[in-house]
Image (cartoon, rainbow, N blue to C red):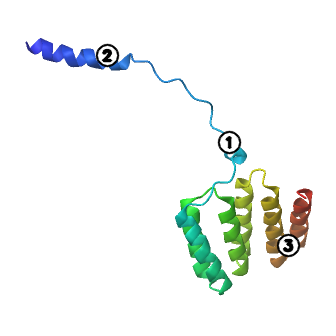
């Protein structure tokens, strides 16, 4: 009797192990070819708050809202661009350039967004006294027109 109690679970396990595996689906589409996804309600609210704070000159509050939004949607290039604009307003030029570059990396084929990012990078470099770097960024922007 004890042998049956031992054999039955082993039989069930063997049946599970031999069941067919699902066919693999198509490979995932690279993010760069996907259309931009709409923001979640939480992110949309954070963007609204950031814009209001930025207009009122409360750049630290605007940056904090955008950083929270980026934690929710880290692949959203528009969030990175908004954060780059705020960092530029805060005169945090290295961070502004970094955020604009991150936005460009997620922008895919959105040349208008990439164009604006290169302009932000140019302004950041010019503000740091890097005229050749600013010129190179403007040249990169012009190639996107």
- Tag 3 residue: 130
- Tag 2 residue: 14
**Could you tell me which residue is drawn at 75 percent across and 58 percent down?**
104
Q: Earlier in the sequence, mark 1 or mark 2?
A: 2
Q: Earlier in the sequence, mark 3 or mark 2?
A: 2
**Could you tell me which residue is drawn at 73 percent across and 65 percent down?**
100
Say which quadrant the N terminus sits in: top left
**What's the CA distance linking mark 1 and mark 2?**
38 Å
**Could you tell me which residue is drawn at 54 percent across and 64 percent down?**
41
- Residue 64 lies, in percent from the top left, at 57, 75
**Could you tell me which residue is drawn at 64 percent across and 58 percent down?**
76
- Tag 1 residue: 30
**Is residue 7 in sight in this rendering?**
yes
Asked if disc 1 and disc 3 are in contact, CB closer than 8 Å, the reply is: no
Q: Earlier in the sequence, mark 1 or mark 3?
A: 1
Say which quadrant the C terminus sits in: bottom right
Q: Residues within 10 Å of mark 3 (few under 14, many from 20)?
A: few
For this orientation, the residue located farthest to the bottom is 56
């Amino acid at each position: 009797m004890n042998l049956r109690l031992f054999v039955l679970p082993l039989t069930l396990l063997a049946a599970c192990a031999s069941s067919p595996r699902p066919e693999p689906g198509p490979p995932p589409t690279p993010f760069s070819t996907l259309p931009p996804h709409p923001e979640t309600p939480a992110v949309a609210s954070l963007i609204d708050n950031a814009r209001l704070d930025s207009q009122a000159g409360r750049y630290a509050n605007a940056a904090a809202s955008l950083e929270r939004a980026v934690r929710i949607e880290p692949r959203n290039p528009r969030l990175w661009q908004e954060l780059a604009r705020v960092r530029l307003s805060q005169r945090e030029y290295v961070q502004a350039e970094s955020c604009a570059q991150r936005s460009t990396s997620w922008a895919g084929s959105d040349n208008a967004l990439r164009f604006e990012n290169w302009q932000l990078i140019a302004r950041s470099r010019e503000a740091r006294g890097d005229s050749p770097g600013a010129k190179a960024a403007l040249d990169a922007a012009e190639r996107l027109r």
